[in-house]
Image (cartoon, rainbow, N blue to C red):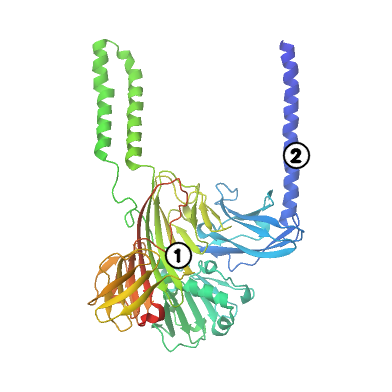
Amino acid sequence: MKRLFCFFFKRFFCIFISIFFAGIALNTVAATKIDKRLYSQNGWIDDIKIKALPALNNIGLQGYFEQRFMIANKANKQKIVKLKIVCSDNNEFHNPSEFSKTIVVPANSMVNTAVYVNSPFLYYHKLDIEIDGDFYQGNEDFGIHIVLTKEWEPLFLLSNRVDGDLSKFPFSENRRRGNRHTSTKITFDVDSLSENFLAYTTFNALIFTQKEYEEFPSKVKSAIEKYVELGGNLVIEEAKIPTKTDGKLGQCKFKVLLYGKIFYCPVKFKKLEKGVDDLLISTLRSTTTARTGKKSFPIILKNPINNTVLVSIIVVFALIAGPVSFIYLAIKKRKILIIWITPVVAVIFSSMIIIYSVTAEGLHARIRAVSYTFLDENKQLATTLGVHGYYCPIVPKSLQYDNNCEIISTNHSYFHFKNNAHSIDWTGEQLLTDNWIKPRIESYLRIRKSEKRLEKLSIVSQDREKLVVINGLGTALKELAVRTKDGSYYKSDSVIKAGEKATLKKAKKLKKYVNFIPYTSVMQINTGTEKFRSKITVCYKFLRDGSYFAVCEKSPFLKHGITENIFSIDLNEESFVYGILKNDGGRK
């Protein structure tokens, strides 16, 4: 029997060792073959050629980084190609974050596409590729490598025509520390500038000459305007000064465009007075780097767990596991059983605490959402800033947002994202997976968004005492205040349902304050001849002629990201809309 066992053992052991080393050899050959095919961007992989196109920059800390690709298909059938940019906090790619997109490439054609990387992960990159389900592992030699600038170093984008080196131009507020600007110059044709505002969000300011800005394609101009409206800055050197401006800074005059500014410099940028650059970094920083947390933006307003109950359970456990058990066993002369009774009682009472906590807190997701939207009905443009706070006992598989949203998580940073891998899939809408929110931990997302929208508030009729309107904002309005073109104020006395006609009564100048977005330190909006600046409140008195302010039941412009039906959601939402009436609120 022993000899038989040794016979089979030796043969099975030899077979196992042979298979093991054969597998290693095959994997090595396959990996070598894949690597050789992938390393060169000039080569073809399964009738597909992929080339990384020049990026606007390779440094950054805030916003999104845009990496564009050219994909050519020489096959006679369509190919499904998945591009995956993999980032990590070290060269070994432990806990990698992934940013991917799946593209259908028609037969015998070429497609240009872009993948966006969230800024805290702009470090150590490689590209993985899937073609019709076949995986090709990449490495850092594909031309995608981004480094991080320091948080206190603002980043400017200059074209080659701008005569100036901002890396040698210290900004005054940090001159003592010796910090300097970081600048990136465009090294390719302006026609290659992005048509998506997300590509510019990593920059504090864009600097162009008047002539070249006029030559930009209309879609590029539109993307730059969105970037400015959401807190960016545009500087035009040797510019024609508009007749109407909102302020002056040194030799420059500027116009406020929602949350950002356009600076018109009559001279070359390098000839500006020192200190002029201070304002260039202020607005974007205020809408992106402000902190959000439990104190400033609590998700759970009242703790559902009663601490008295928990303390009572613990006290009862201490009594039963201690003196009660000891005295009882002493009477029965069975003290030895204390070593069994104590752990059993501990398990029972621990289970009671867990059951009570789960029962009291529940398994439903809690979301607190606040958003502020500037709606220009004439341009059909809605610009929204918002914050979404999540508290989920059970984390959903993903969060889904529009692909024109800039999502900024306040729960991680470049310096603290070890074991905190994140992923975004850009195939359809922006799909956030892996660690954007964590179980039973308050997680926050700051969101900026600009898009074309058709919602509006229609004026049916107006007289001295009342104003009749139709709510076309797509949601019920808790409060509504309107200032018509003639300067008259009107206010609703009740909730106006979506699509409902309502009569507003004439009111005196309104002075009521309402809650505003609490996560930002500075907000600024151009309202024609008036501007307002506020920390946590906004006032009706800043309504300009032909505008309105609405407190909405829910946001028609920014939805929370949980789309799974298995979750019960407790939603606490505040939404405010500052609207410019169609044709400036003229009478109909």
Disc 2 target residue: 25
Checking the image for residue 236, the label placed there is: none
Could you say where residue 380 lies in the image, as x and y percent from the top left?
46, 74
Q: Residue at x 73, y 29 (%)?
A: 17
In the picture, residue 251 is in which quadrant?
bottom left
Q: In this orientation, does residue 168 appear?
A: no
In the picture, residue 581 is in which quadrant?
bottom left
Q: Is residue 497 above or below residue 125?
A: below
Q: What's the distance in space between the residues labelled 2 and 1, CA to CA?
A: 51 Å
Q: Residue at x 67, y 56 (%)?
A: 81
Amino acid at pointer 2? Ala
Amino acid at pointer 1? Arg
Q: Quadrant of the N terminus?
A: top right
Disc 1 target residue: 448
In-image side of 64 versus 256 (left or right) = right
- Say which element carries label 2: helix
